[in-house]
Structure formats: C-alpha cells, structure tokens
Image: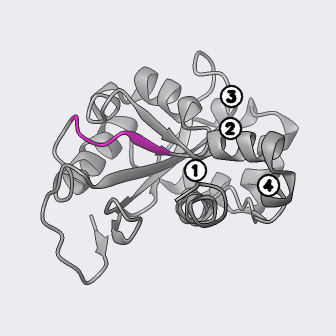
Amino acid sequence: MEIMMAASDNTTNQNNLIWLDMEMSGLLPDSDRILELAAVVTDAELNILGESPAFVVHQSDAVLDGMDAWNKGAHGRSGLIEKVKASTLNEADATLQMIEFLKQFVPAGKSPMCGNSICQDRRFMARYMPDLESYFHYRNLDVSVFKELARRWKPEIYSGFKKASRHEALADIHESIDELKYYREHFIVK
C-alpha cells in the first residue's frame, strides 16, 4: 500500500480532520455497494497533512450491471467501472488499509467525518465497513450545511463557488476542502 503524504509534521493530533469520500453503485445501502473510497487528513486550519490512495473495491458484475443509467454513465466516464472490475481489493482489506493510514494522523474516535453530504457515505460505511465507521467521532463536519445556508441566506455567496463534480473520491475531497475554505472566507463571520 502506497501512502501519499505532504512534507509536514504528520504526528498524530486529535484536532486533525479526516475528510472522506466514497463512490457507490447507487444511493441505497441495502442494495448498492461501495466502489471507491479515499481520505485526506488536514489540520484544524484545513492545511493538508496527507492523503490516502484511492481504494477501488472489487464488486461483482451483478452489482455493476444493476447500476442505474446515471451511475453507469458517471462511473463509466471516469473509468471507475473498469477499475472496479480489475481490482482485487475487498471491503475488509480496504477498511484495514484505510485505518492504518488514518492512525498516522488522528487517534480513533477523535475526528468528525468531514466532506460533502457525508451522511450518505456514513450509511454505506456503517453497513459495509463498520470498523472504519467506528474510527470516526459520531459527529459530522458536512460542508453541504454551509452550502444550503448560503443558498438561502446569501445567494451571491452560494453562486460564487463552482464545483467540477468529477465523481472521483480524491478529487471530490479536495473540492470539499476548497469549498469549506471558500465559505470560511466569504460566509462565516469572523
């Protein structure tokens, strides 16, 4: 397992934040599965300390064939479907490797799960990767809260951040971090 890190002090700190994103075969944890997951760890000021590899989880042809048109299109264009077919990594191994990565930066139970609409990722994690889900604090730092508030209270700020929405785990995480930085600068009163 290759672990990518920024050149910085990567000592474990309970105030570090774990940013996570998953790509799934659909929206329903009872019938859909995890295809890809990745994590980025930042300090409390949103400076990147390290990033995991993107873990692509093998799934059966039945799971992939059962995806709706939107997921087939998005994951086909990104190349994820072919990566899933070629992967030999299962959910249990991806869980273990991700926890090993996270332990370098944040003790178990300290970081909220950070990202965009993170409750959806958490639902899948609780179903298929419960050991990884329990590594996080029960709280979430969900950037979509700021997005929804800005949309209602300050539409000019809401429309100022444009997302690429590539639907690739690492790219989406970096975009979420950048989005929170944007809201910190333009929306949160200092």
Q: Nearer the viewer, residue 75 or 86?
A: 75
Q: Residue 129, relative to residue 49: is it above or below?
A: above
Dominant SS in magenta: loop
Residue at mark 4 to residue at mark 3: CA–CA distance: 25 Å
Q: Which mark is residue 158?
A: 4
Closer to the eye: label 4 or 3 = 4
Magenta stretch?
Answer: 109-114
Residue under the image location 35 percent in, 63 percent down: 42
Task: Work out which residue is located at the far left of the displayed protein and give it.
Answer: 11
Task: Work out which residue is located at the far front of the displayed protein and give it.
Answer: 190
Instruction: Tell which circle, 4 or 1, labels the residue nearer the N-terminal end.
Output: 1
Amino acid type, label 4: Tyr
Task: Work out which residue is located at the far top of the displayed protein and give it.
Answer: 30
Q: Which residue is mark 2?
A: 64
Secondary structure of the residue carrying tag 1 is helix
Residue at mark 3 to residue at mark 2: CA–CA distance: 13 Å
Amino acid type, label 2: Leu
Mark 1 vs 2: CB contact within 8 A:
yes
Q: Is residue 127 left or right of residue 17?
A: right
